[in-house]
Image (cartoon, grey):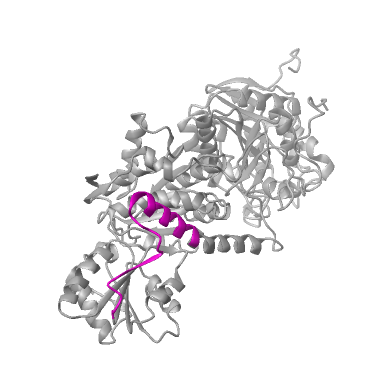
Amino acid sequence: MLEFMEGSHAVAEIVKRCRPQVIAAYPITPQTHIVEDLAQMVANCEIDAEYITVESEFSALSACLGASAAGSRVYSATTSQGLALMFEVCFNAAGMRQPIVMTIANRSLGAPLSIWNDQQDSISLRDSGWLQFYAEDNQEAADLHMIAYKVCEDHDILLPAFVCFDGFILTHTYEPVALPTQEEVDAYLPAFSPYQRLDAANPLSLGMYATPEYYMEFRYEVDRAMERAKQAFIKAGREFGEQFGRDYSALVEGYRLEDADTALVAMGSICGTAKDAIDEMREHGRKVGLLKIRTYRPFPAQEIADALKDVSTVAVLDKNISLGNGGAVGIEVKTALYGSGAAVYDYIIALGGRDVRKKDIAAIVDLAEKGKGDMFYGLRTEVL
Amino acid sequence: MAEVEGGGCELFSAGHRACGGCGPALAARLLLKATGKNVILAASTGCMEVFSTPYPETAWGVPWIHSLFENVAAVASGIEASLKRQGRSEKVVCVAGDGATFDIGVLCISGAFERGHDITYICYDNEAYMNTGIQRSGATPYGASTTTSPAGKCSPGNLHQKKDMPGILAAHGAPYVATASIAYPNDFMQKVERAINTPGPCYIQVHTPCCTGWGFESGETLNMAKLAIETGLWVNYELVNGQVEKAKKVRRKPVEEYLAKQKRFRHLFKPARQDDMIANIQAVADANAERFGIDIKRKESSE
């Protein structure tokens, strides 16, 4: 049954049904509605969890790490400056192989201070060892949390994950969402079974330091787990489809790509706008399609190369910038398509919440087909 | 030297990589004698973490976790919450140096104590960042020369007074706060037992001389700890619900007897004696004696 609700509320409802035993979070716009909803659920005894009202995001993730190591399923949510404050713990949690799931309500990073959406925050953590999943709409945002727990807690993976959805554009927007029942979620997501835990009956030392004789092997193991996470995601996404009828078995998803000459590549809510723009362009005979990236980490390079093997022009929409070298997704798509012969252009869009409309998508397709790209799109030159 | 109780139980094993004469290593051993096996330790980055857990070796016979330098109190908060949810009985104990406690970790400690987690926080205080090469911390005493507060032509060493962390944590409403010294092992162990059996966040700051950082012979560690107490520069006391309950009384010796034995204070005596600095340090000891009432009056015996 579809219910009309806010994106943040949908995420909180799903997180509740995933039965985290410890929640630690610190309020930051536009993540607040999620953690407020969860606090109310705890206050109403709708959820059997410890809720730690930490004094910073740094402590939020540190507390999650401790609780996870002690054997609990944990949850947190943050964005932007809060995620930046967690930087050190992010690398640590991944290196310590704790299967923490954290929602990122994507937001830009200061300076200048901006509370509005882009994807600079999570993308800046791309090398931290966290899986990163991006949602197009609120249904997908909710669903990806269940998949994230399943993938992270797989004993062959044991990595943490960001479930990313665009701040305000999704977090504060009302959409129809199908919420599974508790019994349905329990049938999909088994109770947490830690691979190892802090336990007086079986004392282990966790988080030891490694000399040059051992450090590289630890990093290699994380990288291998990242690679295995592709198959784990596909399997978890397929099982999800079988149970709930919404299939997430693809790391990338094509839209009207079959005969396309030009392909857009994007992540997150902009994919919805792009699909509408493509439908309109198709009505005018333009052979345009979209490739949506669902998993930014692990990066589906081969899947992208396979999906775009027949297109001649690729336009990557980047809601971030690796200052000094263009958009982060564009850089990686170009690497994935190296040698394919396709012309790949990158467009920096929507930074700090700048609105992007269907006409902008169409204009970007025009630019790409004219061979113009690797640029900011939508700059207000009059204020420069 | 008093006999150490619980001698048969060694949960902190020999063969770790601490310097000979390491004060913190002794504190670790005594700590586990006091806690026994039913404990989970959370450690900060620092000397103790490094000398006890070079992968794949560990000296810890109890569950132990190290995450970062400054987050041990937050990690412990999460562990405590998890154990509570699971209905488990292990005690949660943080072990952190003075740099992690007085300086970089204050945010996390303040949060954990304000929230009232049932944890015991042990700060092993060797009065500087020893792991990185003897830099000053908020726990470094006035007048000490460290690599970042060096004595020189126009500086007499560290010019800041030691931060009052026990007072700060007592002000958070901690039910039990204590200072201790490795020179008085039974007292330290009794305080640890009391802390872990007191519900809520408790804090123990244990004085752990560092022969490498302070500059004294490695066989002198316990004597140095004892001299700190006997001069009044370190006071063993308890704060129960914020009130001083018990402070160890002494027949005080002049601070010179403590200072002159350590390289970190050598500049106060050579090349020229700095009477003003020594007087300032004596004033610190006098103020301690006044605040805690530690001076033994005539005809009063040592407690």
Q: Foreground: B289 or A141? A: A141
State the image coordinates of residue B95 (x, y, percent, origin top left): 63, 39
Which residue of the protein is positioned furthest toward the top in this rendering? B299
Which residue of the protein is positioned furthest toward the front in this rendering? A242
Image quadrant assignment for residue A136 = bottom left
Question: Relative to residue A5, is residue A224 depicted above or below?
Answer: below
Query: Looking at the image, can residue B142 be seen?
Result: no
Q: Is residue B209 left or right of residue A130?
A: right
Q: Is residue B114 left or right of residue A343?
A: right
Boundaries of the magenta span: A231-260
Image quadrant assignment for residue B32 = top right
Question: Relative to residue A78, is residue B79 depicted above or below?
Answer: above
State the image coordinates of residue A120 (x, y, percent, origin top left): 37, 63
State the image coordinates of residue A99 (x, y, percent, origin top left): 51, 49
Question: Relative to residue A56, is residue A127 depicted above or below?
Answer: below
State the image coordinates of residue B101 (x, y, percent, origin top left): 57, 41
